Amino acid sequence: MKGLTVRWSLAEAPAGVEEQLASYVADTSHARFTGQEGLRFKTWRCLPGEWFEGCYVFGSDEARAAFQRTFTQTAAESPGSKIIGSAPILIEACDIVAVAEGGDGFLAAGRY
């Protein structure tokens, strides 16, 4: 499987940006990526005051490359960039070595 990490710095972001990002994911972004062709799953991660990140896992090199190409062209104008006030500091492709589902099972949700 093929991964892609997109990370924004929150070091210079406005106060309360983490809540704005969580609301955007719950209200808009989660639905946008649910069922997206070529995407196996996406997670959104945040370390308050440090960074916000989207982690994508695609089923093929082609799906990842197509998404990466399109996203990179508009990254500075993406909704996350607008909320944070800056473009991503990292857009990095990677290989996913393995995924394990724990005993509590997988839970897809727009917000935890």
Image (cartoon, helix red, strand yellow):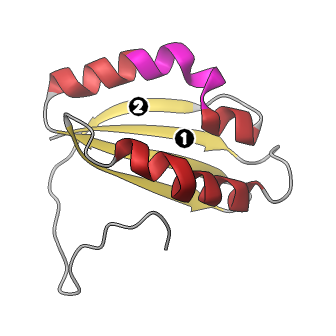
Residue at x 14% of width, y 56% of height: 98
Figure quadrant of residue 5: top left
Foreground of the two, 54 or 93: 54
Q: Is residue 15 left or right of residue 86?
A: right
Q: Is residue 103 above or below residue 35?
A: below
Residue at x 25% of width, y 45% of height: 35
Looking at the rendered structure, the secondary structure element under dot 1 is: strand
Residue 99 spot, x, y in % from top left: 17, 60
Q: Is residue 62 above or below residue 10?
A: above
Magenta residues, start to end: 70-78
Q: Earlier in the sequence, mark 1 or mark 2?
A: 1
Q: Is residue 75 left or right of residue 110?
A: right
Residue 9 spot, x, y in % from top left: 68, 43
Outermost residue toward the right in this view:
15
Residue at x 71% of width, y 62% of height: 19
Q: Are marks 1 and 2 in contact (CB under 8 Å)?
A: yes
Q: Amino acid at mark 2?
A: Glu
Q: Amino acid at mark 1?
A: Arg
**Which quadrant would the N terminus be assigned to in this image?**
top left
Residue bearing the label numbered 2: 92
Residue 30 spot, x, y in % from top left: 44, 52
Residue 41 covered by magenta stretch: no
Residue bearing the label numbered 1: 7
Residue at x 63% of width, y 51% of height: 51
